[in-house]
Amino acid sequence: MKLKRTAIALTHCNAQLGSTTVFSGLSLKVRAECWTSVVGPNGAGKSTLLKVMAGLLESQGQVQLMGQSLPVLPARLRAQRLAWLGQNEAVTEDLTVYDVAMLGRLPHQAWLAPPSAADHAAVQQALEATQAWDWRDRPLGELSGGERQRVLLARALAVQAQILLMDEPLANLDAPHQADWLAMVRNLAKRGTTVVSVLHEIGMALHADDVVVMAEGRIEHHGPSGDPATHAVLVRVFEGRIAIHRMMDQWIVLSK
């Protein structure tokens, strides 16, 4: 892997959901200005890992964001540096699309201050990037699942954070909009944003710079997406039920 500074570092982290230990002693370094995808079978601990990175789930151990301890970062500064897109997020259904995207600008606004010109510009840019600008005046509750997902992605993009964490961002998106998402993520990383995504779509995950393979609460492998060792571990954790082939300059994942 190309040597770059570390954006997120987890050291000997333990995480629990209720009385269940999801992982223990887990350590990981995520490269800055790169796209890292986290993949693995159901129940591997992928979403829990992402929540620990975001500071949304308390854990024992050390979590650092750009070299600073995440728990001691002021909440406002953390929200400016790190944007989050989770699964099945609850948002008031009668908010307009524009207002939902504007929520992403709250970390940059003074208490009760109206949105600035920079805020409006960031929201428009985010809604245009997700092809949701034309619906800006529609209530969120009127949208389909895929349209809603694009608006929530726009909210995360509007933060304009150094780090973007996304848990199953392709949920409800059709194939053309998945391709749009891929182009957008590549562009974000090219411009210096650190992106970490949890994906079920292994073929899409193999477009990332780096891939973290998890199974049963362990990191089985962390390496470049095109590395044969990465592919070998993926095949193993999915019990030989997938095959990875090179076709038309991209990796194709087939089920067996």
Image: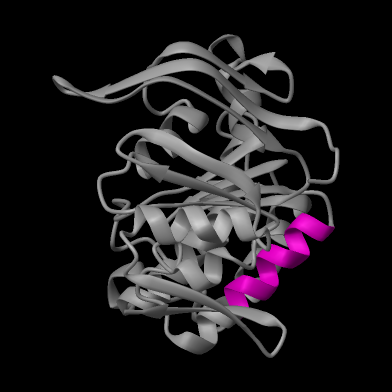
On the image, the x and y values in percent for residue 211 come to 58, 52
Would residue 184 be counted in the magenta stretch?
yes
Q: Residue furthest left?
A: 19
Region of the chain picked out in magenta, as a range: 180-190
Q: In percent of the image, x 32 and y 43: which residue is there?
A: 44
Our reading of the magenta stretch's main secondary structure is helix
* Coloring basis for residues: one colour
Q: In percent of the image, x 41 and y 29: which residue is there?
A: 56
Q: Is residue 147 visible in this depiction of the protein?
A: yes
Relative placement, left or right, of 213 versus 48 is right
Relative placement, left or right, of 217 versus 20 is right
On the image, the x and y values in percent for residue 25 come to 43, 16
Would residue 200 be counted in the magenta stretch?
no
Q: In percent of the image, x 38 and y 71: which residue is there?
A: 242
On the image, the x and y values in percent for residue 12 come to 49, 14
On the image, the x and y values in percent for residue 122 come to 71, 57
Q: Is residue 109 visible in this depiction of the protein?
A: no
Task: Determine the image quadrant of residue 163.
Answer: top right
- In this rendering, the count of numbered labels is 0
Relative placement, left or right, of 150 versus 180 is left
Q: Please, is residue 21 above or below residue 143 in the view?
A: above
Relative placement, left or right, of 90 versus 39 is left
